[in-house]
Image (spheres, rainbow, N blue to C red):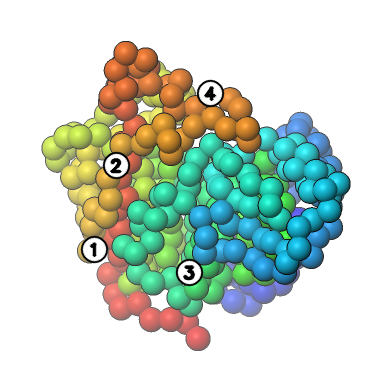
Amino acid sequence: MDYQPLIARWRGSELDRWAQQLEQQIGKGLDQKRYGDLARWLQALEELPPVQADAIHLNSARVGASTATPLPTATAQQLHTTLGKLHPWRKGPFDLFGVHIDTEWRSDWKWNRLQTQIDSLQGRRVLDVGCGSGYHCWRMLGDGAKEVIGIDPTPLFVVQFWALQKYLQQDNVWVLPLPMEQVPAKLQALDTVFSMGVLYHRRSPLDHLQELKDCLRPGGQLVLETLVIEGALGDTLLPEGRYARMGNVWFLPSTDTLLSWLRKLGFVDEQLVDICVTTTEEQRSTDWMTFHSLKNFLDPEDASKTIEGYPAPRRAIVTARLPGDWSPVE
Ligand SMILES: C[S@@+](CC[C@H](N)C(=O)[O-])C[C@H]1O[C@@H](n2cnc3c(N)ncnc32)[C@H](O)[C@@H]1O
């Protein structure tokens, strides 16, 4: 997990301010004293068998790599067993040389819902906040992004990204072990910023939106995906206890409320791109994520409610831009 090439590339660029802090941030985000299981995950990363990919797949539902001829059985088994040590795999799916990592989420469905609705990623520098294993980062690269930076404070997901990177070997996609709060203030250097599945985890959603805005260049685009409720302008649910068994859920706005938050902060061209109720086909337990999943978090008598009696998870995707004309940086 060598971040030096990225730090070197950013030195002297518009991201120099971040480059200066990155080494220390990474040390903190991957601190083995803080994260007791990290040594075990890093050991698994070491144990992954060497395989030279003949083709890499960024534009298919199962992101991954393949060889022209099947792997020897023993190598395939070693790959399968070692990847299994990085359980739970939540965001995917991936396929490495015939090993299908059937993740908890069909993250490709979310990608399909937004891919044609956003500004082209061709030549753009992209930030994916709360990227998990980095599944969507690979898809963004597949859609032509010049550089993709994912950030996520959960070290297991960062290690999962590096397991993919061992075989896909792309030097313009990175997942950094840090939360949004550690991205330097007012970077104004990203062309597109994604925040998907993060807003409802933030106690102050408007501060999160402001932080996302401050990362963007003039005319840059925000792609935001979050839990919402049905309702009118001004309606917002603040679950008192848990929501779908999650303890860290704060504000679920109606879509009109969400769009008004964006306007209030000075975004323009705000648009609702998609809205859907999450199904137990999209989020479910699998061999690669054996813990409870959505089915267990819904009222067994009435799937339109969570186990706590709140409206079942409904997700919206919205886009918005910063005022100004966007043009590519040469
Ligand atoms: C529901 S998952 C969404 C993953 C992915 N973006 C997607 O849409 O499939 C939320 C992710 O946000 C990360 N996260 C939580 N708090 C965060 C923060 N303050 N900054 C950045 N990421 C955060 C979690 O570790 C988790 O991987």
- Earlier along the polypeptide chain: callout 1 or callout 2? 1
Tag 4: amino acid:
His
The residue positioned 42% from the left and 65% from the top of the image is 192
- Which numbered disc, 2 or 3, marks the residue that appears first in the sequence? 3
Does label 3 point to a residue whose CB lies under 8 Å from ligand 1?
no
Residue under label 1 = 268
Residue 115 location, x and y as percent? 38, 61
Sort mark 4 into few (<14), some (14-19) or many (20+) by Cα contacts within 10 Å.
few
- The amino acid sitting under disc 2 is Cys
Question: Crowdedness of circle 1 by 10 Å Cα count: few (<14), some, many (20+)?
Answer: some
Specify whether 54 is left or right of 279: right
Name, please, the residue furthest toward the top. 301
Residue 306 location (% of width, % of height)? 35, 21
- Spatial separation of the CA atoms under disc 4 and disc 1: 40 Å
Seen from the viewer's position, the closer of residues 268 and 142 is 142
* Residue identified by numbered label 4: 292
The residue tagged with tag 4: helix, strand or loop? loop
Question: Pointers 2 and 3 in contact (CB under 8 A)?
Answer: no
Quarter of the view holding residue 70: bottom right
Task: Name the side, left or right, on which 287 lies relative to 330.
Answer: right
Q: Nearer the viewer, residue 205 or 170?
A: 170
Q: Are marks 4 and 1 in contact (CB under 8 Å)?
A: no
Quadrant into which the N terminus falls: bottom right
Mark 3 crowdedness (10 Å alpha carbons): few <14, some 14-19, many ≥20: some
Q: Please name the residue that numbered disc 2 is placed on.
A: 276
* Residue hosting label 3: 143
Check disc 1 and give the amino acid type.
Val
